[in-house]
Every structure is written in C-alpha cells, then in structure tokens.
Image (cartoon, rainbow, N blue to C red):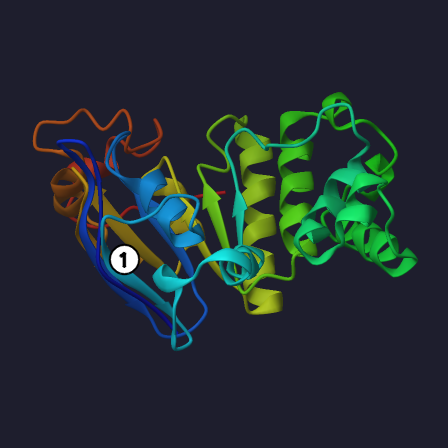
Amino acid sequence: MLAIDGLTKRFGSKTAVDAATFNVSQPAMIGVIGRSGAGKSTMLRMLNRLTSETEGTITFEGREITALTGAAKRAWQSECAMIFQQFNLVPRMDVVSNVLHGTLNKRSTFATMFNLYPTEDIHRAIEILDRLGISEQAAKRAEALSGGQQQRVAIARALMQDPKIILADEPIASLDPMNAQIVMEALRRIHEEDGRMIIANLHTLDTARRYCDRVIGMRDGRIVFDGTPAQLTAGVARDIYGAGADFSEAATSTEIGALNRTEPHAATA
C-alpha cells in the first residue's frame, strides 16, 4: 500500500533523514517518536511532497509518488492531507470557510477567488464539524476558538479533502492534556471508522502506546525502531532517545518510573 525505500533528505552537509525504509500493507495508525531534530517532521513533509527528497522513493498503491509533478503532485497532496502543530488556519475567517479550504485543490480559480462553494460542500463541512463535536462553532472566527477546537477545525479541513492518508505533525504538542486527549481520540476514531491511514509525529511514549497500532522510532535521521506499542520497552526507548537521557522528551511524568522497568507501561486514562 505505502512503501518508503531509502528516503533521504540532506540540507547541505546535514542529513535530516537518512535512508528511511518501511512498508505499510494496510491502513493503520502509526506514531513516529524521537527527540526534536530526529527527522520526524522532514519525513512527513517528504511524504506529502512539501519537501523534495534527496534520494529514495515513496510508492503508494503502485504509484511512485516521488516522481509526480504539477497537477499529479497537487492531486497527491489532496489524497495525503497534512495537519500541523500550529493549525495553519486563517484566523479572521469563519470556521466553516476554513474547513471548506480543504476543497481548494478541486475548485476553479474563479470559485476560489470569490469563495463560491457548492451547497453540498457546505453541508458536508458542517457534518464533519458535527462529527468532531464543534458544529456550533461553524460561524465563529477561527481565532475565537481554543487551541483544541482550532486543531479539530484543522482535522475537519483535512477530512474535506477525503484523503487516503492523514499526516499529523505534532498535532497535540501545543495543547493542554484534556484537549490533547480529545484530538488524539478524534484521530483514532477517524482511523477506525473511515479506514484511513494516519501517521502522526508524537511527543510522548504514553500517547504512542495508547493510540497507535505501530510505532516508528527515529534518532539522528535514522529509523531505529519499528514495532508494536507492546515492544516499546525501556531499553528500546533508550535506543531512540539516547543512553543516559532523562526522558524529558520521551515521557510524561507518570511514565518516568515505568521507563526503569523492563515491562512496557500500560497507559491510563
């Protein structure tokens, strides 16, 4: 389904992603973990084609994504939606219009210039907002919403694209614990109910264990772990975050003690 082979990105003399290779045979919810600067965001940006690779290939359902250009590349970016840490909404625009921006790649230049949307698209946008529990915010400006609500608007915008893959780059890093849980539960429901593949860069081991089917660990641009949450032991965590690390980036305060045990931590609600 999705095959990443030798994917590499260099910025001058620095290698941000070093020969990343993995395959996904069916839709799954995949968490990517690692220290800041490990290459997680760069890898997602290459998957979406926001950044070009230096070497390697991305193949999805038999198509070589790294070979796409022009309209074909833009079509792929509709199929492979991106959610960002800082939401990337238009602050002064109302919520429903922000969600409708998910259809921009499918609309004419004239319709885009004058914000002309088909009635069925407007209804669908409101239905998606309702699914995410924020339809009552549809007429408000995006800037009036809380961070957690804004991230759900960003998820709704991604769903308007009807993507096969959703890439989430640190989607909860700027949220408080309650809103982080709401956002992660929303992404998990989307995976389970829609059968969409979700690949999310995550900040904590706890989140990866709780919500993901598969975890990929990156260190210094290389994939150093690829397995199930149950296989994410303290020793593996040290391989990902470095020997002697205090795990301040790896774990929540409730996990630090568990990292000193050999059995994987079972996250609590």
Direction from residue 155 to residue 25 in the image, left or right:
left
Describe the element under mark 1 as helix, strand or loop: helix
Q: Is residue 133 left or right of residue 241?
A: right
The disc labelled 1 sits on which kind of residue?
Answer: Ala
Residue drawn 40% across and 45% down? 45
Is any part of residue 75 visible from this angle?
A: yes
Residue 96 image point, x, y percent: 81, 41
Q: Quadrant of the N terminus?
A: bottom left
Q: Nearer the viewer, residue 97 or 33?
A: 97
Residue lying farthest to the right in this orientation: 119
Quadrant hosting residue 238: top left
Which one is nearer the viewer's eye here, 80 or 143?
80
Residue 130 placement (x, y as % from top left): 80, 50
Q: Residue placed at 65% from the left, 57% from the top?
A: 161
Whether residue 4 is situated above or below residue 55 in the rendered picture: below
**Where is residue 257, by image quadrant?**
top left
Residue at position x 12%, y 33% in the image:
242
Residue identifier under label 1:
230
Name which quarter of the figure residue 17 lies in. Answer: top left
Q: Is residue 117 above or below residue 162?
A: above
Q: Where's residue 263, x and y in %?
A: 20, 50
Residue 6 percent across, percent down from the top left:
19, 58
Q: Name the residue rendered at 50%, 38% in the picture.
A: 171
Along the viewing direction, whichever of 170 and 59 lies nearer the viewer: 59
Q: Mark 1: give few (<14), some (14-19) or many (20+) Cα within 10 Å.
A: some
